[in-house]
Amino acid sequence: MSPFEAVSATVVLAYMALFLILTVWASRASGRSVWLFGKGSERQGLPALLFRISFVGAVIYVTAALSAYAVTADPIHDALDGQVGNLFGSLLVLAGAALALYSQAYMGQSWRIGAASGEPGRIVRIGRFAFSRNPVFVGQVMLFIGHG
């Protein structure tokens, strides 16, 4: 594992921890649960399960990569391996983490995981949200593509 890859993996783990910290902060600040998968008239069991699996899976994958047990027969990794590819990936990881964390913090008390009709929280349409309906997800995609 190159130093760029190690930094990228560490940033991914730090992002995941900060994601949880900001989620707890938003919940406490708003005085309500921000976990909306089980609320509303429509239960969202499958999205909730997929969210949990992907979150835990990302932590396990990145931890394994840091432990040097990751699968090395990844064709995308092989094509982008090298100093330039690793630098680009690391920059993408940093930019994605910054965008996702900034966007999550920008939502403030409107932050929530999932959607349920009738749940409080204004729709944020200014700042980064004027360009993308969900810049948190855009940042997360950048983060994981850069790490991959």
Image (tube, rainbow, N blue to C red):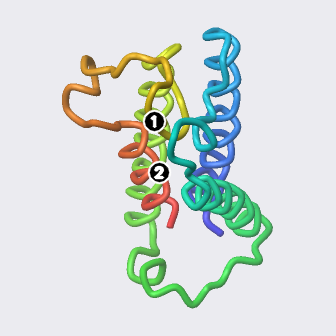
Vertical placement of residue 75 versus 85, above or below: below
Residue 143's tag is: 2
Left or right for 8, reference 143: right
Vertical placement of residue 51 versus 134, above or below: below
Q: Position of residue 85 (x, y in %)?
A: 40, 66
Q: Are marks 2 and 1 in contact (CB under 8 Å)?
A: yes
Residue appearing at x 25%, y 21% in the figure: 125
Indicate the amino acid at tag 1: Ala
Q: Residue furthest bottom?
A: 73
Q: Residue furthest right?
A: 67
**Residue 80 quadrant:** bottom left
Left or right for 111, reference 139: right
Local crowd size for mark 1, using a 10 Å CA cut-off: few (<14), some (14–19), many (≥20): many
Residue appearing at x 61%, y 49% in the figure: 12
**Residue 17 quadrant:** top right
Indicate the amino acid at tag 2: Leu
Name the quarter where the N terminus is drawn. Answer: bottom right
Residue position for label 1: 100
CA gap between label 2 and label 1 equals 9 Å
* Of the image marks 2 and 1, the number of the one nearer the N terminus: 1
Q: Nearer the viewer, residue 17 or 122?
A: 122
Of the two numbered discs 2 and 1 in the rendering, the one whose residue sits closer to the viewer = 1
